[in-house]
Amino acid sequence: MIQHVSLEVSEDQVQDCVAFWIVLGWREVPVLPGIHDHSTWMERNGVQVHLQRVDPPTIPHGGHVAIVDGNIDETVARIQDAGYEFLERERYWGSRRIFTRCPAGHRVELMAAPPG
């Protein structure tokens, strides 16, 4: 099991990224002392995304975080309502999946079920 993934974001993008992850169904959680000055943590079901403050951040073009979301239809509706763009992808294994980008530019894939 992966416990967390770290994504680099600039200081001025942190709050917009927090709002994005909340739309995806995540919540902000406390950060350990000594780390809180350069990191913001988001969590869902025991898995975390750490937003690391780095100026300038490195944003991979094709790399992405893939998340299984059993309520993908509801999440996509929230993404639309919040004004974020997304791209519906082919259902290679029969499950809905989309790509979107957080305000810092990181690609995020949401899938109704994992491959297999």
Image (cartoon, rainbow, N blue to C red):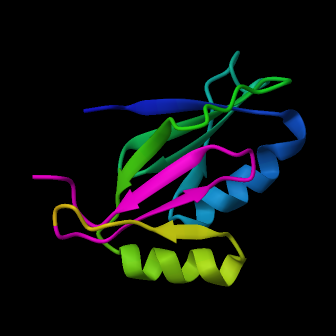
Query: Is 96 covered by the magenta stretch?
Result: yes
Image coords of residue 21 (percent x, y): 60, 57
Image mark count:
0
Q: Residue furthest right?
A: 12
Along the line of sight, which residue is nearer the eye, 69 or 58? 58
Relative placement, left or right, of 57 versus 66 is right
Instruction: Report the span colored magenta.
Output: 94-116
Q: Image point 46% across, 42% down: which residue?
A: 65
Image coords of residue 34 (percent x, y): 70, 15
Q: Image point 38% across, 73% down: which residue?
A: 72
Relative placement, left or right, of 107 versus 90 is right
Q: Image point 36% across, 44% down: which residue?
A: 46
Along the line of sight, which residue is nearer the eye, 43 or 69? 69
The N terminus: image quadrant:
top left
Relative placement, left or right, of 60 versus 92 is right
In which quadrant of the rendered view does residue 85 lie?
Answer: bottom right
In which quadrant of the rendered view does residue 31 lie?
Answer: top right
Q: 23 above or below 50?
A: below
Query: Is 66 covered by the magenta stretch?
Result: no
Q: Image point 39% across, 47% down: which residue?
A: 66
Image coords of residue 10 (percent x, y): 83, 34
Along the line of sight, which residue is nearer the eye, 90 or 82? 90
Image coords of residue 27 (percent x, y): 56, 56
Q: Residue furthest top?
A: 34
